[in-house]
Amino acid sequence: MFTDFDLFNFFRSWLGWVVAIYCSIVTARWLWDLLGYVRSTDRTIAMVRRYVAVQLLRIRWRGFWYDLLICVLLTVAFFLLWHAQNVMDEIEAALRHVASVHASAAGARQ
């Protein structure tokens, strides 16, 4: 049962889940704190809100879309590599199964 257990794959999966959960929590807390800061009624914060709104309206869309396209393509490449790793794991499991069946058949003939 534990002959097919790979410690590296277990560690990699465990680490991925821990990092994803940690990053989600840190990002959510940061956004919540930022929202509370921006909702403040202070005069200087209101000026910062207007400044940010003006900068968002003046954004250079061509450069923004180019960067967004690169992020999307890198995400697609990541998922393709992830799928390829899963396919390789399935091939490895099938080859191990075939080898064990072949070995048991060869042992039965002798």
Image (cartoon, rainbow, N blue to C red):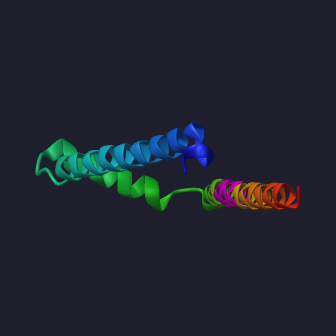
Q: Position of residue 100 (x, y in %)?
A: 76, 56
Position above or below: 18 against 83? above
Quarter of the image where one finds residue 53? bottom left
**In the image shown, does 72 or 104 lie closer to the viewer?**
104
Query: In the shown orientation, is residue 10 left or right of residue 105?
Result: left
Residue 14, x across and y down, in percent: 45, 44
Q: Please provide percent x and percent y for residue 26.
A: 31, 43
Q: Residue at x 65, y 53 (%)?
A: 67
Range drawn in magenta = 73-86
The residue drawn where x is 55% and y is 38% is 7
Q: Quadrant of the C terminus?
A: bottom right
In-image side of 91 versus 40 (left or right): right
Of residue 30 and residue 106, the one placed in the foreground of this image is: 106
- 98 sits left or right of 65 in the view: right
**What predominant SS class does the magenta segment belong to?**
helix
Report the front residue among 29 and 77.
77
Question: Can you name the residue that lies furthest to the front here?
Answer: 110
Magenta-span inclusion, residue 18: no
Numbered label tally: 0
For the point 19% across and 42% down, the residue is 44
Return the residue nearer the eye: 51 or 1: 1
Q: Residue at left 59%, top 42%?
A: 6
Residue 45 point in image, percent of width and height: 20, 45
Against 87, is 3 above or below?
above
Residue sitting at the far left: 41
Q: Is residue 77 magenta?
A: yes
Locate residue 58 relative to residue 53 in the image: left or right: right
